[in-house]
Amino acid sequence: MQFFKRLIIIILLLPSLEANEGYVDNNGVEIFYVDYGPTSNEPILLVQGLGGQLTFWPDELITVLQDNGYRPIVYDNRDVGLSEDFKDYGKPNFIWNYIKFYLGLPLRSAYTLADMGSDGIAILDHLNIKKTHILAQSMGGMISQRMVADNKNRFKSYVLIASMARTPDLQTAPRGELRKLIEDRSFGNQTLDGEVERSIKIFKILASPNTEIDEEKFEKEVIKNFNRSSNTEGFSRQLIAILADKDRYDEVKTITVPTLVIHGKLDPLIPYEEGKKTAELIPNSEFLGVDFMSHLIDKPVLDYIEPPMVKFLDKNS
């Protein structure tokens, strides 16, 4: 009898466990989202980094959040994945923007980080979510800093991973092979073979030390994402939007939402000290430095941050 009761409960819950996906119109810009559910759980909006499609979020992270009572909602930032592209603006001129960046001159972008933040708010409005948790990584952290600062009443808590409030400049820009790979991705001609090779190299740099990579499986995932979206220029326009933004120091100082800042001491893309400084500027924040973390939320990092992150979310639910 007990078995049949459980079976009935599972059947009744099935609709709420199915991922819900669709498009949201944000002032004429179509944004694609996936709501993993279940709808009975606490919602948490995830904001992805530079050039990252929503498929880039690790399955393990989605599962961890669901298993702990949360409802992950992910989306493709504008100009990437299945969200609307801005191809009409053309590909940014590498040489001219390179010169302006190194001279400290202002850059013009097709859209701003504030515009990108409004896409996330549009999804919450569409799903009729009045208040949510938010988790953001890298560029997603930069986008969400403005989002949270301007919409404090919409968020219960804020998890900021591998990001900073400073606009990248000569002091904070990546160096060596990583810089060359990013420049090649931003301004070179994109081919599938080149994307696979470059993605593997970038992953090895941004992953935790000694993290094993199944290159055959990884290659299949890169090809799958490449085929999912033919927009290869959005990365460049998103990068210009980052560089065209101003330092967000004043904005993060106004954030009153409970915040957990997580940053790796080995991060070669976003300096550890900048992550720590951002945490110090946010009044109601906690800082978690991870000795062995580079830039990505790979399995070793997720295993380490899961307990404090879940505890933080639960405390603010």
Image (cartoon, rainbow, N blue to C red):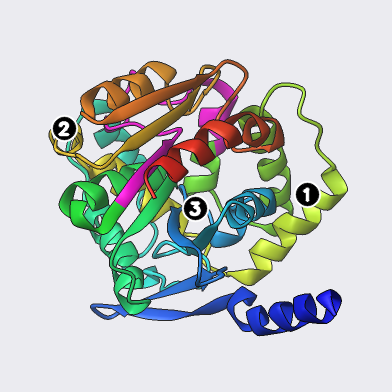
What is the crowding at mark 2: few (fewer than 14 residues within 10 Å), some, or many (at least 20)?
Answer: some
Q: Earlier in the sequence, mark 2 or mark 1?
A: 1
Q: Position of residue 252 (x, y in %)?
A: 20, 36
Q: Residues within 10 Å of mark 1 (few under 14, many from 20)?
A: some
Does residue 152 lie above or below 205 as drawn?
A: below
Reply yes or no: does residue 129 show up in magenta: no
Residue to which mark 1 is pinned:
218
Of 239 and 310, the residue lying toward us? 310
Q: Position of residue 14 (x, y in %)?
A: 67, 80
Q: Position of residue 166 (x, y in %)?
A: 27, 30
* Alpha carbon distance from label 2 to label 1: 39 Å
Q: CA distance from mark 3 to mark 2?
A: 27 Å
Question: Between residues 68 and 244, which one lies in front from this camera angle?
Answer: 68
Label 3, on which residue?
A: 51
Decide if residue 262 is in sight here.
yes
Nearer the viewer's eye, disc 3 or disc 2? 2
Report x, y in % for residue 240: 32, 47
Residue under the image location 34 percent in, 63 percent down: 120
Q: If you read the primary sequence from the N terminus, does the residue marked by circle 3 or circle 1 appear first?
A: 3
Element marked by disc 1 = helix
Residue at point 45%, 32% (across, down): 162
SS at mark 2? helix
Q: Amino acid at mark 1?
A: Phe
Q: Nearer the viewer, residue 259 or 267?
A: 259
Tell me the residue that label 2 is attached to: 253
